[in-house]
Image (spheres, grey):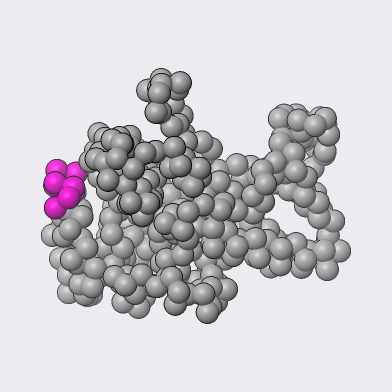
Amino acid sequence: MDIAIVGGGAAAVALLDQLAATAPGSGGVTVFEPSAHLWRGRAYAPDLDSVLVNSPPALMSIRPGDFGHYAAWLGERGPAHLDALLGQPLVPRAVYGGYLARTAETALATLRGRGWHVDVVPARVTALAGSGERPVLRTEDGQAREADHVVLCVGAGTPEDLYGLGGAPGFVADPYPLARTLEGVAAGSAVAVIGSGLTAVDVVVSLAARGHTGPIRLVSRSGLLPYVWQRPLGHQPRYVTAERVAALHREHGAVTLDDLVRLLRAELAEAGEDFDDFAAGVLAAPSEDPVRRLRRELAAVGDPEIGRRVLQSAAHSVGPYAWRLLPEADRVRLRRHFRLATSLA
């Protein structure tokens, strides 16, 4: 089989790693990536050292089921990037890009050794047409390639100019790479950041690292900053797992949001924690003063409760699988809390 992968960032690396581990026989893989940052994508391209990977190493493994894969690659580099509060290494994103590149190169070498034809095309795909049984991809430089399967790994793309500010003096539509963007920001100037998510955090932290002295304001409809990760306790969930979710699906033919809540409730009950108190605290976040909430969470980095740890980890490890099984009505329920959910995760 011939597989065409459009985009050469982290999603493409994950696919190649799985192909190298599980694909039988031989075939062909063609990766189309026009940028200079092959395997790194926009997120993990070279930038300031203040632009960090924001999750513990166990959740950054590219290989599902092997939570130590990234940590093993990090090895001796880890202690140099140890975060004092978290007790875990949080590396510059460009360093993580090196992990992605190494994983991709290893996967390609494995596929070649098995007889697969592997090609990386530094061109942008501009069209996809169904010609007969095999789709045809066309690139901006005039190439045409057929494939049996086409996988889109194009990421989220650059931000939209939702407020029509393009061309306004001082407006930056896409802040990355911050190394380039912040060169044009005077140290004493006033900066307004639209939003309060991880990109906003990158901007603020990087300005501070450069000694910015002017006022910085985050302008946000929700006022929600990303939650602070707590130090890992080594707790292994017994209820909130992909295996439990799969069992529910086999038994009932469906998985509902109420099913997932029951799993989390059981997890907390076994640890002696009250689910209703925990849920009330999560749902109260949008009405809490963001600065007070940030300071409270920083003070609770080492607290022994497992509730937020389990929910945050499950959002990454179980969430993508569970989402596909939820009925549309439950997806609508979750989308109503989209900003809260993404800040928590």
Q: Is residue 248 above or below residue 58?
A: above
Q: Position of residue 290 (x, y in %)?
A: 18, 47
The quarter of the picture where residue 125 lies is top right
35 or 313: nearer the viewer: 35
* 31 with respect to 341 (left or right): right
258 or 117: nearer the viewer: 117
Q: Position of residue 108 (x, y in %)?
A: 75, 62
Q: Position of residue 255 (x, y in %)?
A: 39, 53
* 233 with respect to 71 (left or right): left
The quarter of the picture where residue 27 lies is bottom right
Q: Is residue 287 magenta?
A: yes
Q: Which residue does the image show at 20% across and 55% down from the upper left?
A: 294
Quadrant for the C terminus in the image: bottom left
Looking at the rendering, the stretch of residues picked out in magenta corresponds to: 284-292
* 82 with respect to 115 (left or right): left
Q: Majority secondary structure of the magenta segment?
A: helix
| Total number of numbered discs in the rendering | 0
Q: Is residue 261 above or below residue 272?
A: above
